[in-house]
Image (tube, rainbow, N blue to C red):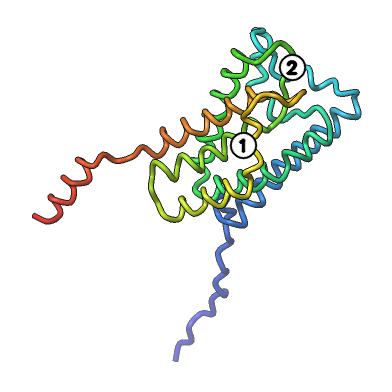
């Protein structure tokens, strides 16, 4: 009798990191938040010299701030105020897909940066609050355009939890760039409109009719 050749036990496949899973999205956002704190530590230890790389309205050299602005903050208190909404709202957006998160964030940063560069007063604008407002607006716009129950619930919960942010869209607070908040909010609405266009009723009706015939 020929005995079968013993084989090595099958190894369980390694689980790949999924950035859009609940745990993966939280991990990635926590890492990004850690990067913001690391940048602030370096900035504070160097006399806030990195702030000069922020956005400078109507200054061509200041256009670089469209990319660098969200990574820089004027103080630890400034960053602390942005930390929780940055983590939570970024996490909610990321759970819907890594590609959607990348595209939405890119659209938000672009529109926010250009809007702020055009209308904000002279000076230096720093902070991740524009992106934070953009993510909040994106969640609301996505729910409005897509009309998915789960996304509507998420949008309502996010808007209720961070309702205090809406006051940041209004001018009046010294040292706060409400223009950056408005620009980010507009960017979030645009991202929701671009990434989740609403289907027309005619298209929906024709699709239903074809399925029935």
Quadrant for the N terminus in the image: bottom left
- Horizontal side of residue 66 vs 102, given as left or right: right
Compared across the picture, whether 194 is left or right of 173 comes to: left
Residue at 75% in and 18% down: 53
Give coordinates of residue 43: x percent, y percent: 84, 28
Quarter-wise, where is residue 73 in the image?
A: top right
The image quadrant of residue 108 is top right
Q: Compute the Cα span from label 1 to label 2.
A: 23 Å
Which label lies toward us, 1 or 2? 1
Name the residue: 49% across, 54% down: 153
The image's mark for residue 124 is 2
Name the disc covering residue 23, or none.
Answer: none
| 109 and 140: which is toward the camera | 140
Horizontal side, residue 162 vs residue 209: left or right? right
What residue does disc 1 label? Answer: 166
Q: Secondary structure at mark 1?
A: helix
In this view, the residue farthest toward the left is 213
Where on the picture, by quarter, is residue 13? bottom right
Of the image marks 1 and 2, the number of the one nearer the N terminus: 2
Residue at point 54% right, 76% down? 7
Residue 37, above or below 46: below
Give the percent coordinates (x, y) of residue 89. Answer: 61, 45
Q: Taking 92 as reference, is 12 above or below it?
A: below
Spot the residue most to the front.
172
* Residue at 74 percent of width and 17 percent of height: 124
- Return the x and y of residue 74 as percentages of the image width and height: 80, 27
> The C terminus lies in which quarter of the figure?
bottom left
**Proximity of marks 1 and 2: CB atoms separated by less than 8 Å:** no
- Say few, some or many: other residues with alpha carbon within 10 Å of mark 2 (under 14 / 14 to 19 / 20 or more): some
């Amino acid at each position: 009798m020929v005995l079968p050749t013993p084989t090595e036990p099958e190894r369980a496949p390694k689980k790949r990191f999924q950035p859009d899973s609940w745990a993966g999205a939280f991990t990635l956002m926590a890492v990004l938040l850690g990067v913001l704190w690391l940048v602030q530590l370096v900035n504070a230890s160097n006399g806030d010299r990195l702030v000069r790389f922020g956005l400078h309205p109507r200054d061509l050299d200041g256009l670089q701030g469209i990319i660098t602005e969200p990574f820089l903050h004027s103080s630890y208190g400034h960053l602390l105020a942005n930390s929780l909404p940055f983590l939570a709202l970024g996490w909610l957006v990321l759970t819907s897909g890594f590609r959607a998160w990348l595209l939405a964030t890119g659209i938000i940063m672009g529109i926010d940066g250009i809007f702020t560069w055009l209308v904000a007063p002279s000076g230096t604008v720093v902070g991740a609050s524009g992106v934070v407002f953009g993510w909040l607006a994106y969640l609301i716009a996505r729910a409005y355009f897509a009309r998915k129950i789960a996304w509507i619930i998420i949008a309502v919960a996010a808007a209720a939890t961070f309702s205090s942010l809406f006051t940041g869209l209004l001018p009046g607070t010294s040292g706060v760039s409400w223009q950056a908040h408005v620009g980010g909010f507009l960017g979030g609405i645009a991202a929701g409109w671009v990434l989740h266009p609403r289907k027309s009723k005619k298209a929906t009706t024709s699709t239903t009719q074809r399925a029935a015939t």
